[in-house]
Amino acid sequence: MSVKILNKEVLSDFSGVRVVRMVLEAPEISRKSAAGQFIVLMVSEEGERIPLTVVESNAAAGTVTIIFQEAGLTTRLLGKLNTGGSLYALVGPLGHATEIKNYGRVILVGGGVGIAEIYPVAKALKSAGNDVTTILGARTKELLILEKELKSASSQFHIATDDGTYGRKGFVTEILKECLEGGKYDLVYAVGPIPMMQRVSEMAGKFGVKVIVSLNALMIDATGMCGCCRVVVDGKTKFSCVDGPEFEGSKVDWKGLDKRNRIYADKEKHICNLKLR
Ligand code: FES
């Protein structure tokens, strides 16, 4: 049964980077989905399956919202669909939900399209009584997403852009360091590019603060059967889809994850050239 696209909105479109928000009709998933979980979708019957975080779920409306950057073939094909259209299939919610409780003072760090993934966690942590500090990072102002939404879920709010076009010029880790130097925090939660999550994990580790990251491992079945999403955590092999997607950042083998995530990069480029010409 196909899945209806109830709304599509381009959040940013700058310098070849397009980030899109879609609201999908998915009543059963919307009733069960919690912060930190993801869905797997297929754009067409012949297409690949890709995981995307559930950014918002609305049980009353029977909808889930996803946000994605058009990067590979499937996200680009997904980005071509419009409001009123449909995609082939959707399954979820998958993965463990974020452990939501009153930790005390938490810092959320989002980089690039990873900002979309920290949004549901920020809302849930705030509702649980946490004091939420949010640090957002983007290459440039035009690529910053969900600023208003995350600001309203945070007590303290910071922005860094690589080129200094908005907020502080520099990296999220510089702001994170200043926050950690300035007070006691109980948890850091980070989602973004692998180098960013690695640096955030190292920085939080220096201050003895636990850090949780949500990994963007490659997936196929997303049910723990294919082994595609394996990642080494604390010296043990874990499957990101069923054991994660969240892990303690200080225990992740970042080098191994980065290498696995690049494994199909050349093939992806080739197939995009063939199919999107
Ligand atoms: Fe196959 Fe996780 S995607 S085991």
Image (cartoon, grey):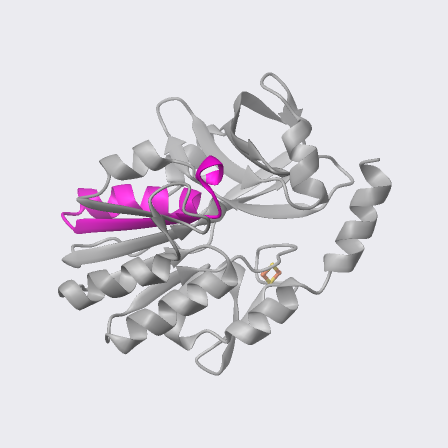
Q: Nearer the viewer, residue 13 or 92?
A: 13
Q: Residue at x 64, y 45 (%)?
A: 71
Q: Position of residue 179 (x, y in %)?
A: 21, 60
Q: Is residue 218 left or right of residue 61?
A: right
Asked whether residue 24 is in view, the answer is yes
Which quarter of the rendering shows the N terminus? top right
Q: Position of residue 107 (x, y in %)?
A: 25, 56
**Vertical position of residue 63 compared to residue 142: above or below:** above
Task: Give, as a single range, the part of the protein colored magenta.
Answer: 115-143
**Vertical position of residue 225 compared to residue 4: above or below:** below
State ligand 1's quadrant: bottom right
**Vertical position of residue 177 compared to residue 31: above or below:** below
Quadrant of res 226: bottom right
Q: Nearer the viewer, residue 152 or 7?
A: 152
Q: Is residue 270 left or right of residue 154?
A: right
Q: Residue at x 42, y 39 (%)?
A: 55
Quadrant of res 104: bottom left
Q: Residue at x 83, y 39 (%)?
A: 275
Q: Position of residue 209 (x, y in %)?
A: 24, 71
Q: Position of residue 69 (x, y in %)?
A: 57, 41
Q: Residue at x 27, y 49 (%)?
A: 134
Does 121 lie within the magenta span? yes
Which quarter of the rendering shows the C terminus? top right
Give the total of numbered labels. Answer: 0
Asked whether residue 227 is in view, the answer is no
Q: Nearer the viewer, residue 15 or 164?
A: 164
Does 99 lie within the magenta span? no
Residue extending farthest to the bottom is 235
Q: Nearer the viewer, residue 246 or 16?
A: 16
